[in-house]
Amino acid sequence: MSARQPTQHVASYYAASANPGPERPSVSGRVECDICVVGAGFTGISAALHLAEQGQSVVVLEAARVGFGASGRNGGQLVNSYSRDMDVIEAKYGEETARALGSMAFEGNRIIRDRIAQYGIACDLKEGNIFAACNAKQLEGLREHQALWQRYGHDQLELLEGEAVKREVGSSRYTGALIDHSGGHIHPLNLVLGQAAAFESLGGVIYEQSPVTQLTHGEPVVLTTPGGEVRAQRVVLAGNAYMQGVEPRLESKSMPCGTQIITTEPLDEATARALLPNDMAVEDCNYLLDYYRLTADNRLLYGGGTSYGGQDLASIEAVIRPKLLKTFPQLADIKVDYAWSGNFLLTLNRLPQFGRLNDNVYFAQGYSGHGVTCSHLAGKLIAETMRGESERFDAFAGLPHLPFPGGRLLRVPFSALGAWYYSTRDKLGI
């Protein structure tokens, strides 16, 4: 049998500007530990670092490289709350659940900032993110959004209307905007690499190029890889959209979806400041939203679109560049240096899936596009649960999750049809 070829990071701006770090060995022979975490992205590394701080013996298994999946490819925005906001949670699941989840809605952001400060992680942290309204209906939605978050104790929001938006965004697309001054943006791959190094500094072990080919439940749990096996008393499954085939029960109520990003050549300072005068990150309020920000070296990083099922596009630039030019037509002659895609995991109710498969196998996944902050919260809650404090984890674990209509065969076209419907409403402003 030929050796498995190492899987490296995709050719993205993030990979090209990543902080130096080691290529870690793969599993060889038998490894024993207290806890094994599957997946070295934000969820897995957050959980592993919290657990190592508790003094646990933790091993992380990664099929490729640390941050290979969504954690090293996303838009890099620190957006608070969840993909479904608190009013929807309250209406569907009741006041008690809404209060429990609401009390944690802004915690992931704080965890990230604490990690950056505590471990001196260089990941280009910048302040502020903006929700931009493309029509009057979306602006009214931002007013409601501001009032809703204030009900849950978050008062760092500023509403802009009309021409005031141009104070923050050099585009004529928007009728209003809501600034979250507690938000921000980062280099996500460097954030996860920095936390991985912090985990290792506490005695944690990461194996790369070690995909789990079989998971055998029991005491201990046995995780088989091409080079050997790991035997663990407890396991955390944190592979999200990149863990197909390991545990079928985690695939039936979720769907991988792709998003695409391009990054321009570096802009001169005057051009960069004209686009985003205060260097905040932006996402619009459309169902299929656009999102963008400036990098540390003044490139415009612009993403958008969703490919249901996670299929790769023939030309990412051909899809995303027109979106960029609709927002910033003044960049018509700009060169695109990087274009890449990556998958996130979507759930039907757009809320994350936390839970246990049995007494010693835990999981967290399905952030539905809001994974940067919520994944860090997930890691902390998993660590709390493993030391016997499960109330906060169980607030998420108690959420009901249903499979997508049409099953595995028809979930992609059904979801695409729904996206077309809501996108049409966005275009019509209704």
Image: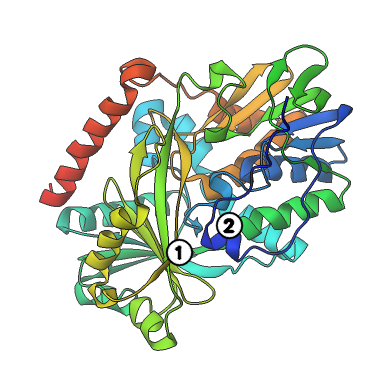
Q: Which amino acid does label 2 sit on?
A: Pro
Q: Quadrant of the N terminus?
A: top right
In the picture of the structure, the residue carrying the numbered disc 1 is 156
**SS for tag 2?**
helix
Badge nearest the viewer, 2 or 1: 2
Q: Residue furthest bottom?
A: 270
Q: Which amino acid does label 1 sit on?
A: Gln
Q: Which residue is drawn at 72% across and 38% down?
A: 209
The picture places residue 394, in percent across and down from the top left corner, at 60, 27
Q: How many labels does the image show?
A: 2
Q: Which quadrant of the figure has residue 21?
A: bottom right
The picture places residue 247, in percent across and down from the top left corner, at 60, 19
Q: Going from the N terminus, do you reach mark 2 or mark 1 first?
A: 1
The picture places residue 299, in percent across and down from the top left corner, at 45, 73
**SS for tag 1?**
loop
Do we see residue 338 in this rendering? Answer: yes
Q: Eyeballing the image, is 55 above or below 395?
A: below
Front in this rendered view, residue 82 or 6: 6
Q: Which residue is drawn at 68% across and 22% down?
A: 213
- Left or right: 1 with respect to 418? right
User: Which circle marks residue 188 in the picture?
Assistant: 2
Crowding at dot 1, Cα within 10 Å, few <14 / some 14-19 / many 20+, comes out as: few
Colour convention of the picture? rainbow
Q: Eyeballing the image, is 155 above or below 8?
A: below
Do we see residue 387 in this rendering? Answer: no
Q: Residue at x 56, y 29 (%)?
A: 395
The picture places residue 155, in percent across and down from the top left corner, at 44, 61
